[in-house]
Amino acid sequence: MVTVFCEDVFCSLLRVALGLSRDFPYNPTEQEWNSLFTLAKQQTVLSLFYEAFSNLPEPCRPPRQLLLRYAAFVESVHGLNRLMNLEAARYTRMFEERGVQSVILKGQANARLYPNPLSRQAGDIDIWIPGGFVEVERLLLDMGLISKKESTKDIFHHIAFRNEHGIEIEVHHRLASGIPFRNHLFSKCLMTEIENSALVPEGFYSPSIRFALLMQLSHLQQHFFCGGFGFRHITDYFMLLVHSSQEDREYVWKRIEYFHLGRFCAAVMWVLEKAFLLPQEYMLCQPNKRYGIFLYRGIMTGGNFGRNNPRKTIRMSVLNRWFHDRMDVLCRFSYDPLNVILNELNYWKKTFSLIPERVRRRNITLSKRSRN
């Protein structure tokens, strides 16, 4: 279980890692260092911690044995980031040869903003290609990147495949998802802004800060409704904000208000203020403590994509788990009621559609909510 002390040290180390502070008024024990290692691993920010250690005096660093574990892991993260950058540039060239300009979303584009771009733990490569599902699927099939059986319409906004290097590639044919009755307008807004993408030294096109702030906030909200997200995503959003201009933030906030993302945005601002001491001048809106505390607790206990949620790691009856899942839905209702209602309707639709198959297999487990 994560203690308040570990949470405070965790946030302090993140601030030191990003060069926001050199103040570290803690002296963790070996056991606490091990707990911090586990927490950082769950939040996929372990390599960032190693950046912090070089800025700490010798007595404040973790035990040598733990440092060696950090060093081995960080070396692999740096190597993977170099490979991911090369692969992102390679796919950019491949699509350009077909007359298509692609844009790298999220991960590798966000990493460029970090003090050490290689320190961000990479996940997959997200690429946007214009044209919609049919055109994008046809292009990927023609290029031999996917086979017909790998392509699916079940994933709302992307087609995924694993390349020869074992890297997961997600080719997005939609820019937005999960904005009920406003998705088309939100997509049009993002389409207008993605035209301002620029070719970066790494060899791929990176979207503007305005696009990233809008797109990634909606993406975080969907993960929040469908399982959760971790501190890697929160750190990404912090880096976007500190690289934005006042004009960028004013532009983004007007659209956040229009698309009713304001409550979730206020929760994110509170978490950023608590974790990174984000100054008011960089905030998109006033932070909301009530919404923010619930979001923060979910991030801390759930880890990356909510994979470390205690309900997923302990034995629990189907009925008990189902009851807690429904209670979670109620807790999220006030953030975006319409979004929550439609997600629940979709859940029940899938659940009832699977009943005949469940009965045939004598399996009463209810369907799981889909995750984007």
Image: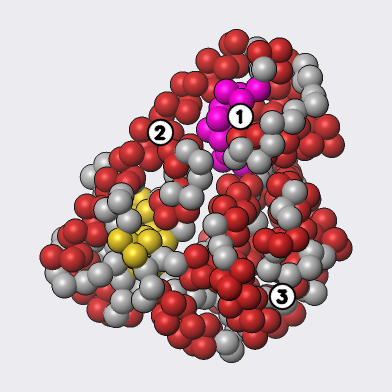
Which region of the structure is painted magenta? 41-56
Q: Is residue 3 visible?
A: no
Question: Nearer the N terminus, badge 3 or badge 2?
Answer: 2
- The location of residue 107, given as percent across then percent down, is 45, 53
Which corner quadrant of the image does residue 48 belong to?
A: top right
Q: Residue at x 31, y 40 (%)?
A: 83
Q: Residue at x 65, y 85 (%)?
A: 258
Closer-to-camera residue (217/156): 217
Q: Is residue 334 above or below residue 185?
A: above
Which of pointers 2 and 1 indicates the residue nearer the eye? 1
* Residue appearing at x 67%, y 61% in the figure: 282
Q: Say the numbered circle drawn on residue 288.
A: none
Seen at 66% across and 41% down, the residue is 20
The answer for how far apart the CA atoms under marks 3 and 1 are is 33 Å
Kind of residue sitting beneath label 2: His
Residue 266: % across, % down: 75, 67
**Residue behind mark 1:** 52
Q: Is residue 276 left or right of residue 239?
A: right
Disc 3: CA contacts within 10 A as few (<14), some (14-19) or many (>=20): many
Say if mark 3 contacts mark 1, CB within 8 Å.
no
Q: Is residue 370 above or below residue 117?
A: below
Amino acid type, callout 1: Ala
**Residue 78, labelled with which disc?**
2
Judged left or right of residue 270, residue 192 is left
Q: Is residue 150 magenta?
A: no
Identify the residue under disc 3. 262
- Quadrant holding the N terminus: top right
Q: Is residue 52 magenta?
A: yes
